[in-house]
Amino acid sequence: MKFLLLLLLTISISLAHAQQRTDKPFERKGFIFGTSMGASAVQLTFATKPTQTEASASFPNFKIGKMISNRTALMVYLPGSIYTYKNEERERDRGFEGIIPSVQYWFKDRWWVMGGLGLGMDAPAFYDIKNEDERKFYFGYASIAGAGYEIWRKGKCAVDIQSRVHYGAITRPEGNSTGVAFSLLIGVNWY
């Protein structure tokens, strides 16, 4: 985990120094697509188990939407953090995820904030399904808030560093569960 955070910091500093500060104004228009990955600290509370806190990978993270002005985008954000679900049969990976309509706003040329409300999901990790019982999805509601800084831009592409808080409340057969993930990410976006 420390290695990943150090790697993210090193990449961001390198890209920031490589970027020339004599940029012409960056125009954002049309559709936007972005993806990001990084690290999360996830805390989950289940109805029948003790609270679980762990560091994990944060993926997949996708956003797709449309710029409605040079500073504002309406989009659907798909956050995800992997966690280890422990039960009687075996430990397995699951995703703390969502499908969240969001608004992203650039309050400065490179600085942006984002927020939204939508569908929360607890989903099986596709690579860790051993039988049909492990394919179950659980749903609820979710919210998200984030901020970012574009450290490198060229043409219609931008690389940014993002921080994000993702909250979800999920209905499961054994009772409701809640979770929160704090993430540090590197993103790539196309406008």
Image (spheres, helix red, strand yellow):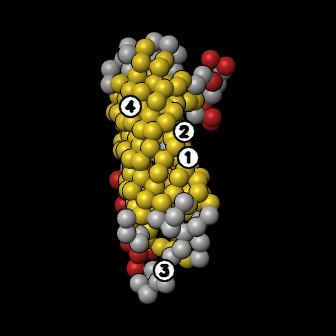
Q: Amino acid at mark 4?
A: Gly
Residue at 59 percent across and 72 percent down: it is: 156
Q: Is residue 113 visible?
A: yes
Residue at 41 percent across and 43 percent down: it is: 144
Specify the label residue 25 is tagged with.
Answer: 3
Q: For the residues marked 3 and 2, what is the alpha-carbon distance in whole angstroms?
A: 32 Å
Q: Amino acid at mark 1?
A: Val
Residue at 42 percent across and 18 percent down: it is: 176
Residue 146 picture location, percent across and down: 39, 51
Relative placement, left or right, of 68 versus 42 is: right
- Labels 2 & 1 near each other (Cβ < 8 A): yes
Tell me: residue 151, above or below residue 61: below
Relative placement, left or right, of 162 versus 67 is: left
Q: Secondary structure at mark 1?
A: strand
Q: For the residues marked 4 and 1, what is the alpha-carbon distance in whole angstroms?
A: 20 Å
Q: Which residue is mark 4?
A: 179
Q: Amino acid at mark 2?
A: Ile
Who comes first in sequence, dot 2 or dot 1? Answer: 1
Q: Secondary structure at mark 2?
A: strand
Specify the label residue 99 is tagged with.
Answer: 2
Who comes first in sequence, dot 3 or dot 1? Answer: 3
Q: Which residue is mark 1?
A: 76
Q: Secondary structure at mark 3?
A: loop
Q: For the residues marked 2 and 1, what is the alpha-carbon distance in whole angstroms?
A: 7 Å
